[in-house]
Image (spheres, helix red, strand yellow):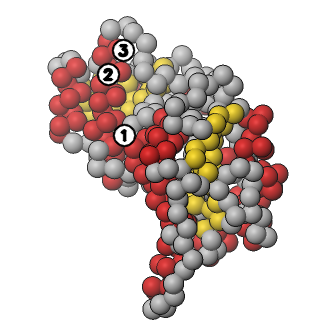
């Protein structure tokens, strides 16, 4: 079997090591693994590849990949899949779940930045301005998590340990974990938004979730509430978010994802004092690839054994 891995150098936590390659070879010594850093380097290897591994949005077009049977994503989202893959019999799996710990920690960092007014203090530090702030506690706050997948559940679990009241919105019929105080479905979103001090988006981007958050949803939030988005930028109508922030409809936003990435330099979000921006790196961790390769090897064994793959993507649903 020929496996082609695209490991982009610009994403440091996706580095493939000799130890990772050894683990793949342990599945079957006859496996041939080729590692490249971009689509240009991948071109000559595509005709031989039976399995392709990488970040979906950075994969090369599969036109020349005549032997391709399976594509495995090193990330969680599947919204960037090439239409030629979606409309083919090629199997698609992803690494959903391997980044739950670092992303949940990132969300907690966002919440502390706002409750402890660190965004103000950091700005004051650059100006050598000694000015105390009115701080609040995260304990007893209400956090609404929209999307109770791996990341949402881990975030809810951590927050419950801190004495936070955690509520969630997810698909109808979802069982309520013990660390949640309340769970509802999408039809109840407007009601749940009005209860929350922080609204945390942990959804995949699909046709149904595109611009799911806009003017109406912001008006349903408390004026003191903060929006946190670690899902995908296009889940939020960015133009309407900017208007809501400018008009103080909501108190702030913490964004690890944006509609256009990198965020254009002319975006008003850069200069807003009540906005915290990180460059879509909340999944970053020194342990990320160890977990991702472990997940891939489990799938590789399943593939060889003719069994169902873990995290098999429903290409019609988009996740």
- Of circles 3 and 2, the one toward us is 2
Most foreground residue, 304 or 216: 216
Mark 2 packing: few (<14 Cα in 10 Å), some, or many (20+)? some
Q: Position of residue 304 (x, y in %)?
A: 32, 12
Horizontal arrangement in the rendering, residue 39 relative to residue 114 (left or right): left
- Considering only vertical position in the picture, is 27 above or below 7? above
Horizontal arrangement in the rendering, residue 167 relative to residue 50 (left or right): right
- Considering only vertical position in the picture, is 313 above or below 111? above
Q: Determine if residue 38 is in view.
A: no
Residue that mark 1 sits on: 6
- Considering only vertical position in the picture, is 133 above or below 58? below
- Of circles 1 and 3, the one toward us is 3
The answer to whether mark 1 and mark 3 are in CB contact below 8 A is: no
Q: Position of residue 139 (x, y in %)?
A: 52, 56
Q: How far apart are marks 1 and 3 (CA)?
A: 20 Å
Residue 303 is labelled as 3
Q: Position of residue 295 (x, y in %)?
A: 34, 28
Q: How far apart are marks 1 and 2 (CA)?
A: 19 Å
């Amino acid at each position: 079997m020929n496996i082609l891995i695209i490991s982009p150098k610009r994403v440091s936590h996706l580095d493939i090591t000799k130890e990772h390659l050894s683990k793949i070879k342990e599945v079957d010594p006859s496996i041939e693994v080729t590692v490249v850093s971009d689509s240009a380097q991948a071109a000559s290897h595509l005709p031989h590849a039976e399995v392709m591994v990488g970040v979906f949005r950075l994969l090369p077009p599969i036109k020349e990949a005549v032997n391709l049977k399976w594509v495995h994503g090193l990330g969680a989202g599947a919204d960037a899949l090439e239409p030629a893959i979606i409309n083919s019999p090629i199997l698609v799996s992803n690494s959903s779940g391997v980044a739950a710990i670092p992303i949940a920690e990132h969300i907690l960092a966002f919440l502390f930045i706002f409750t402890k007014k660190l965004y103000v203090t950091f700005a004051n530090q650059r100006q050598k301005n000694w000015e105390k702030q009115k701080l609040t506690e995260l304990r007893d706050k209400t956090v609404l998590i929209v999307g109770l997948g791996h990341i949402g559940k881990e975030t809810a679990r951590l927050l419950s340990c801190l004495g936070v009241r955690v509520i969630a919105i997810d698909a109808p019929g979802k069982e309520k974990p013990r660390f949640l105080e309340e769970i509802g479905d999408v039809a109840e979103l407007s009601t749940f938004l009005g209860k929350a001090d922080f609204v945390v988006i942990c959804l995949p981007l699909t046709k149904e979730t595109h611009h799911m958050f806009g003017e109406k949803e912001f008006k349903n939030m408390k004026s003191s509430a903060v929006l946190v988005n670690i899902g995908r930028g296009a889940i939020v109508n960015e133009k309407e978010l900017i208007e809501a922030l400018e008009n103080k409809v909501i108190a702030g936003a913490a964004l690890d994802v944006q509609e256009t990435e990198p965020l254009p330099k002319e975006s008003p979000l850069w200069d807003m004092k009540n906005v915290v921006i990180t460059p879509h790196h909340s999944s970053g961790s020194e342990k990320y690839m160890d977990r991702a390769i472990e997940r891939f090897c489990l799938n590789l064994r399943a593939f060889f054994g003719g069994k169902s793959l873990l995290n098999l993507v429903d290409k019609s649903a988009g996740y």
